Image: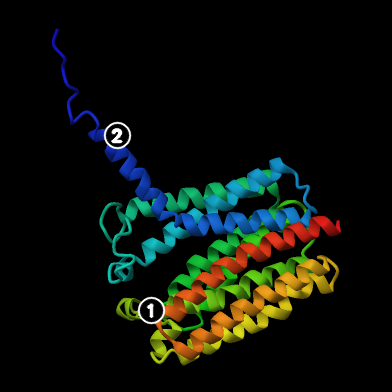
Amino acid sequence: MSIVAASPTASVPRVKVLSRLRDYVELTKPKIVVMELVTATVAASMASWGSPDWQVLAYALVGTALVAAGASAWNQWIERYSDARMIRTAERPLPAGRLSSLESIVFGVVTTIAGLTLLAVQVNALTALLGFATWAAYVCFYTPLKSRTVHNTAVGAVAGAMPILMGWTAVGGHLGLSAATLFLIVFIWQFPHFMAIAWMYREEYAAAGCRMLTVVDPSGRRAGLQAVIGALVLLPVSVLPAVIRWAGMGYFVAALLLGLLQLAAAAWFAWRLDERSARTLLRASLVYLPTILVLLLLSCRIVS
């Protein structure tokens, strides 16, 4: 009895398909999409006091993910040449030549339209409008401003915080002080977070022609000051939910301690301005946001 070995070329088409899928996933910037879905979910849960309409929320999250994916695809198409000049982005699908410009544009158009349509039909018009505003802020303003002004960070922070409002309105939440507070927490958090990233990759941003604060001011002093100011402003904003009795005293204490730790990391970064302090601030910011959101969610459910 003879055994016929499978041809090694039989799995080649499957490998190509999987590789293609990975490229399209990378085109969506999945880490950013996941972060936006987490913030939208937390906002929806808070707006409904822990009892959202799960079907509506599911539609909202899928729509939000599609809009975010479309925005990222457009962003990578616009930045394909500058991405090719940075080590950390040179292997993205477009600069590496694994996807064409046409494929990226078609993907961006289809996902954006599908996401906005889903939000408008299955969720509500306000959430769809906020979704479009988020897409426009990221693609039409933040992306081109990166090569023109240091204020691109503030515009990008608006786009990064908008999914909070999308999650809030998706479950029928009213856009008042509570929603604004949550939006501000995510908005302000991005400044110390991104100043650390901008310092770590300042040489690559300079090579790509990006007008980051660390490129305009190579000393890093302005970036350090902005990180400290952001962490400092975040302290009173983060405890506001307890002040307006939306969250409890336990949250107040925890948020204050967490904010002080991030402020200490920002101050150390501003003082040292080196790789180690920048990475410490980056890690502190990555711990801060999910922790503060979980604390808020738990505290709101207890208060309710």
Local crowd at mark 2 within 10 Å, few (<14), some, or many (≥20)?
Answer: few
Q: Residue at x 60, y 77 (%)?
A: 262
Does residue 281 appear left or right of residue 46 in this picture? left
Type of amino acid under label 2:
Arg
Count of picture labels: 2
Front-most of residues 257 and 86 = 257
Q: Which residue is mark 1?
A: 210
Quarter of the image with the C terminus in it: bottom right
Type of amino acid under label 1:
Cys
**Looking at the image, residue 247 lies above or below residue 16:** below
Scheme by which the image is coloured? rainbow
Percent across and percent down for residue 27 are 40, 54
Per the image, label 2 sits on a secondary structure element best described as helix
Q: Which residue is mark 2?
A: 14
Q: Residue at x 75, y 57 (%)?
A: 298
Q: Quadrant of residue 292?
A: bottom right
Q: Quadrant of residue 29?
A: bottom left
Does residue 24 appear left or right of residue 98 in this picture? right
Instruction: For residue 263, say whether it is visible.
Output: yes
Tell me the distance, in whole angstroms, between the alpha carbons under discs 1 and 2: 38 Å
Front-most of residues 177 and 232 = 232
Percent across and percent down for residue 281 are 51, 76
Does residue 20 appear left or right of residue 262 in this picture? left
